[in-house]
Amino acid sequence: MSILNNAVINYAHRGASGNYPENTMLAFAKAVEMGCDGIETDVQMTRDGVLVLIHDERVDRTTNGSGLVKDYSYAELCRLDAGLWYGASFAGAGIPRAEELLLLARDAGIRLNFEIKNGIVQYEFIEEKLIELIYSYGWQDLVILSSFNHYSMVHCKEIAPSLKTGLLYMEGLYRPGLYARTARADALHPYFYAVNEEIICEAHSEGLLVNTFTINDPAAMRRLVQTGVDGIITNYPDRLRSVMAELNC
Ligand code: G3P
Ligand code: MG
């Protein structure tokens, strides 16, 4: 079960991204208003080494710019609009820095799941920079790092053994609990189609948490809560709140 009041941890995926432009301070603040326990976000890095929160390696889909995040300086990235693509009323939203979210988390007392996006673009020292930042805000106990790049998660453990890590994956891995232990991880972060009771039991017997993504349908939320997952990553933290209330947890 979860580490917080035996309830499933409600992580808002890219903030309340079902209703607001993903990975913006607005989406994060709205997720807090909706009663999330934590926020999941995606970390990339600018040319001048600033950690920024944006899902894609390119800025094209979610801003009015084009090109790779790694080729922008932070000052250049600040000129882009990260709200307009979602709707005219969201114009003016920027791409947040990781520390802006850490400040919000500290104010609101919520957890954070930083997903390090270092599968396609290799950002040198992204793990070191992020970990240093998390510790400088004193928020390490309420943070879990995750990545599809499991080498990166092993590297994080080498830098900060007590910081929690989760292994993201999409497929039906065989004995993922055993695998995760070899990577010294604290959690599995599987795509929700890849979760079943057997996997959850094995993970729990290995002392691992199971946080699954991205579940937006209340019926699927209900099923996963009842199956025993520890955390659910959703674009609709308000829906998950309602499901949890319905199930009295
Ligand atoms: O961390 C869960 C989920 O965000 C992983 O996939 O592509 O939405 O970042 P993606
Ligand atoms: Mg993500």
Image (cartoon, rainbow, N blue to C red):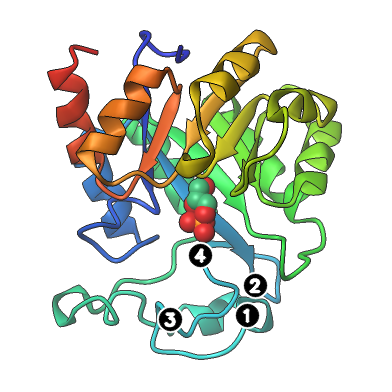
Kind of element beneath mark 4:
loop
Q: Is mark 1 within 8 Å of ligand 2?
A: no
Q: Can the viewer see residue 133 in this picture?
A: no
- Marks 3 and 1, the one that precedes in the sequence: 3
* x 56%, y 40%: residue: 190
Q: Say which element carries label 2.
A: loop
**Label 4 to label 3: alpha-carbon separation:** 10 Å
Q: Is the C-beta of the residue carrying label 4 under 8 Å from the nearest atom of ligand 1? A: yes
Tell me how far mark 4 sits from mark 2, CA to CA: 13 Å
Mark closer to the chain start, 3 or 2 = 2
Query: For the point 56% across and 80% down, which residue is it?
Result: 58
Check the image and report above or below for 66 versus 236.
below
Amino acid under disc 4: His
**Could you tell me which residue is drawn at 56 percent across and 45 percent down?**
114
Label 2: few (<14), some or many (≥20) within 10 Å? some
Give the labeled residue for mark 2. Answer: 46
What x and y, as percent, mark residue 33? 19, 40
Sooner in the amino-acid sequence: mark 4 or mark 2: 2
Q: Alpha-carbon distance for marks 2 and 1?
A: 5 Å
Instruction: State how far apart marks 3 and 2 are (Cα).
Output: 17 Å
Tell me the quarter of the picture where residue 50 sits: bottom right
Q: Would you name the residue on which mark 4 appears?
A: 55
Q: Callout 1: 10 Å neighbours few (<14), some, many (20+)?
A: some
Q: Position of residue 63 (x, y in %)?
A: 40, 81
Depth-wise, is mark 1 or mark 4 nearer the camera?
4
Q: Residues within 10 Å of mark 3 (few under 14, many from 20)?
A: some
Q: Nearer the viewer, residue 244 or 81?
A: 244
Q: Which residue is mark 3?
A: 61
Q: Secondary structure at mark 1?
A: loop
x, y percent for residue 207: 66, 12
Nearer mark to the viewer, of 3 and 2: 3
